[in-house]
Image (cartoon, rainbow, N blue to C red):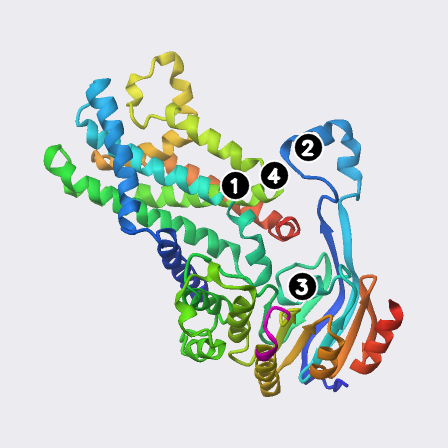
Amino acid sequence: MRIFISQVIALTLANLKSRYRGTLTGFVWVILNPIILFGAQSFAFHFILKLSVQDYPLFLLSGLIPWIFLSQSLEMCTPLFTNSGRLMKSISINPLVYLIAQILDNLINFLAAFLVLLIPLSFSSSFQFKNLLLLPLPLFFLFITTLSMSLILATLNVFYRDLKFIVSFVMTFSFYLTPIFYPETFVEPQYRWIIKYNIFTHLISPVRAAVMGQLEILNIFMISALSLLFSFLIWRHKKNALYHYL
Amino acid sequence: MPSTTTSNLVAKINQLSLVFQTPLYRNWTLRDAFIHTAKHPLEVLLSDKNRLPVLNKLNLEIYKGDRIGLLGVNGVGKTTLCRAIAGIYTPTSGKVSIQGKVRAIFDTAAGIYPELTGRENAYLLAKFMYPEESKMDFLEEALEFTELNDFLDTPFKNYSNGMQARLCLSLISCKPCDLLILDEVFDGADQFFREKISARVLKMIEQSGAVIFVSHSNEQILRVCNRAIVLKDGSISFDGKPKDAVNYYSKLL
């Protein structure tokens, strides 16, 4: 276990380093990317579409940034085993170390962008810093769910290489079907079921609730427990055959 | 020849079979899988068509001091056997039991992050090759041994095959281990470095453990090994002195 953790840390740091090696500003890009997206969306939805939501920038931030973490992780991890087949067959390396390092890397980038945006917003909105104390729990469950889903997708992608394309397309349309840039209350009652049965709603809204000062973690807890169980079963069943397809 | 006392046993491979479950000549995508299943529902459930047996009830005992040369034609399962011993492949049936630590490298072009420098990749590789070591003080010595000097701080992706081989081989031969597996790894390095690295590997073997050495060069097998095995049809068809094995092997062809 100690070895596992030390390998994960080494790989996470290397991942962070390698992603922006060769760029001039390095880590700034990591934060700039979500900030620009956030800026563009808050301009479009707040000033052009004039969505009447209280504290819209804060509202958008608390949904969009976790969404970027989730969708980016799933899209990056799905082809992870497939692409690193050569390495996995060349030295004895636990694929889980590789996967966890990738998601931790994304998590660190996500937290950095989140905090950088939150600080200026805290002066111009009703945000209270004590709400940060509510964040670790939903974020922990979000991390566990992202990890489990990524493991399932990365494993299955080795057997069905179409998955990569399906994931990217599902994430694109899910962005519009998940209450990220609009509140759930804007949705007409006859379409509510789409939001209700959309698993991503229940992953994103606890983070937003925490930023707004509420703790709602029952759904995300159950989803994370279930996906962890599923990923464990699939991993146990497939991890040996995995190497035959790499 | 191997001594027969069990205390010197490094690895025992008992009735090892390895069957690849792999599509034989298809690109296996969801669409193909769907069409195939719709066309031949029974075949998908029952058939063994996608199973490719590589190793078949193979038995092998490796003792301390053995320097085993592994001979066999391409595709006979040399690398598969080595990967099974290294714990990368799980046997379909049978058992591989190892006393101690195995170190293996199967691809000397293996950089973990090609964007990062040779030095950074070496550190990461060492983390996986020597997971039990908390101090990485042996790393400097290995990096010096590569004689890559300033190239160590340039991206790994820009290395030539030979330079990558130098880095990986120097790393794998840092510390003695109980069983070292070298699978056709000397081929990338230049003549000069090959001499140098085989001296280093030989020195390390003398210090402890056993080695499995896969090569298509009879000359190398004869020079490095004190025991040789010929693989044929998924199991061992000859096990004995390297000279006899090379003779036996050349008659097979």
Chain of the residue under the numbered disc 4 shown in the image: A
Q: Which residues are magenta?
A: B187-192
Q: Marks 2 and 4: same chain?
A: no
Measured along the vertical axis of the image, is residue B7 above or below residue A23? below
Q: Secondary structure at mark 2?
A: helix
Q: Main secondary structure of the magenta part?
A: loop
Q: Secondary structure at mark 3?
A: helix
Q: Picture coordinates of residue A203 (x, y %)?
A: 37, 35
**In this figure, which residue is indicated by the disc labeled 2?**
B32
B232 displayed left or right of B133? right
Amino acid under disc 4: Tyr
**In this figure, which residue is indicated by the disc labeled 1?**
A153
- Residue sitting at x 33%, y 16%: A187
Amino acid under disc 2: Asp
Q: Secondary structure at mark 4?
A: loop
Report, in whole angstroms, how far the alpha carbon at label 1 lies from the one at label 2: 19 Å
Report, in whole angstroms, how far the alpha carbon at label 2 lies from the one at label 3: 30 Å
